[in-house]
Amino acid sequence: MTEKQKQILLAQYRLKQAEESLDEASFLFTGRKSPRSIINRVYYAMFYAVLALLIFEKFASSKHSGILSFFNRRFIKTGVFPEEIGQSINNAFELRQRGDYREYIELTYGQVEPFMGKARIFVQTIQGYLNHAVFLNES
């Protein structure tokens, strides 16, 4: 197996994680479970999609903020993806941070609901890019 084939398998695994996280978020939202848990799953769906994308880049970071910063510089500022895509993950990251790490913060369904559709569009956009730019070119 070539290095490129290994990268593709790992990217496909990350995209599977993204899809699973979207499904989990939908299940939690439909069941009117914790908005904090919903935004966590929504954010991670987008984050896993970014990780799938970055497998093909010469970049490494152990921090979410570093990964998001690189993603924005490499893919949003250069016009590979529209600004709305970058705003979606940045806003989900911020909301997740507030919900997870600030004291006495109670997120609402109204705050997390818009991210349900945004996350699906985000993941589909990354999948489409990888299918066109990477996966099909390897076949």
Image (cartoon, grey):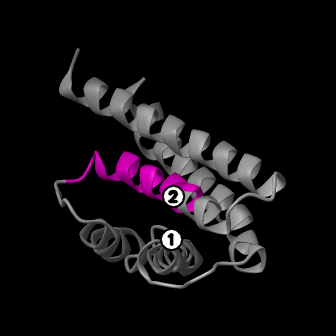
Q: In the image, is 106 to the left or to the right of 77?
A: right
Q: Residue farthest to the top?
A: 1
Dot placed on the residue nearer the N-terminal end, 1 or 2: 2
Q: In which quarter of the image is the N terminus?
A: top left
- Residue visible at 60% across and 42% down? 19
Question: Is-magenta flag for residue 45?
Answer: yes
Question: Is the Cβ of the residue at disc 1 closer than 8 Å to that at disc 2?
Answer: yes
Circle 1 packing at 10 Å, graded few (<14), some (14-19), many (20+), is many
Q: Inspect the image, locate mark 2, and give the three-letter code of the amino acid beneath it.
A: Met
Q: Is residue 96 above or below residue 121?
A: below
Quote the CA–CA distance across marks 1 and 2: 6 Å
- The correct choice, above or below, for 72 with respect to 57 in the image is below
Residue assigned mark 2: 46
Query: Residue at the spot x=49%, y=75% of the render?
Result: 86
Q: Residue at x 68, y 43 (%)?
A: 23
The part of the image, by quadrant, that contains residue 82 is bottom right
Q: What element carries label 2?
A: helix
Magenta range is 41-57
Q: Where is residue 34 in the image (x, y as percent from the top left)?
A: 68, 62
Q: Is mark 1 on a helix, strand or loop?
A: helix
Q: Mark 1 points at which residue?
A: 89
